[in-house]
Amino acid sequence: MIIAIDGPAGAGKSTISQRLAARLGFVRLDTGALYRAVGLAATRAQIAADDESGLHSLVAELALRFDAEGRIWLGEEDVSEAIRTPAMSAAASRYAAAPAVRAGLLDLQRRLARQADSILDGRDIGTVVCPDADVKIFLTASVAERARRRHAELAAKGPAPSLQEVAADIEARDKADRERPIAPLRQADDAVVVDATSLSIDEVVARCAALVDAAR
Ligand code: CDP
């Protein structure tokens, strides 16, 4: 069984996917982490976002993998923390628009999804990566609420940008993700919208679990 959870930045896809996976005994595949890791590697290698051949080679050679705890590795380096900065959010979105990056990660995502009952969260899971997913959820929330949550998440780790800056980053990234020509952020026609603005995490998980139960 495959569950697709798509939605804009900071809607809570990570938390909900983790909880849902634990509850159902599914494997969770954080596709945003893949784009973030590519963004990190491309930034370090100083490859321009429009350098298609450079990005093609980079993605082909990257030893990207998730371990059993869901941490993400680039070769011998655990990059799980390094990819979570505001700079890497922006880099992920910039490089995610490149055809070479999207094509390179598409096969990997489909291969991983075939290995077990899976929950994939991202932007184009229900539309492009797994159009035949058994359950499609489009998780969203107001910009103000998403910015508040992302700001709290960053502030818990150390010095964080202001709430206004976080909101501006989220809006800019959503716009770029929605307007890119390939695999833009969009709700699949057969996805169910879950608006988390005024719901607790438990309430969102319960709603998603009910959608999964109905599909089984
Ligand atoms: O956690 P957050 O919602 O802020 O972002 P993420 O899911 O980690 O994704 C980071 C960026 O990767 C997004 O802004 C997208 O540009 C890109 N992405 C994508 O293009 N397609 C996916 N399936 C997942 C992420």
Image: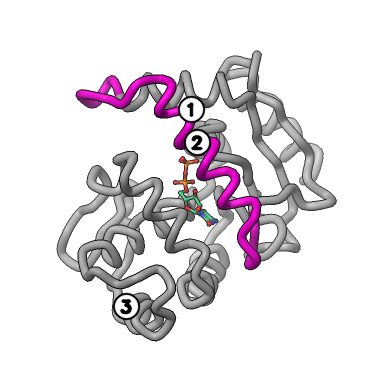
How far separated are the C-alphas under marks 3 and 2? 27 Å
Residue 165 picture location, percent across and down: 40, 27
User: In the image, which residues are magenta?
Assistant: 155-184
Q: Which residue is mark 3?
A: 58
How far separated are the C-alphas under marks 1 and 2? 5 Å
Residue 181 is covered by the magenta coloring: yes
Eyeballing the image, is 30 above or below 38?
Answer: above
Q: What amino acid does circle 2 point to?
A: Ile
Which one is nearer the viewer's eye here, 1 or 204?
A: 204
Q: Does mark 2's beta carbon lie closer than 8 Å to ligand 1? A: yes
Q: Residue furthest left?
A: 76
Q: Which residue is mark 2?
A: 170
Eyeballing the image, is 165 above or below 35?
Answer: above
Residue 1 picture location, percent across and down: 66, 55
Eyeballing the image, is 60 above or below 193?
Answer: below
Question: For this view, does 126 lie left or right of residue 101?
Answer: right
* Disc 1 + disc 2, Cβ < 8 Å: yes
The residue sitting at 50% across, 33% down in the picture is 10
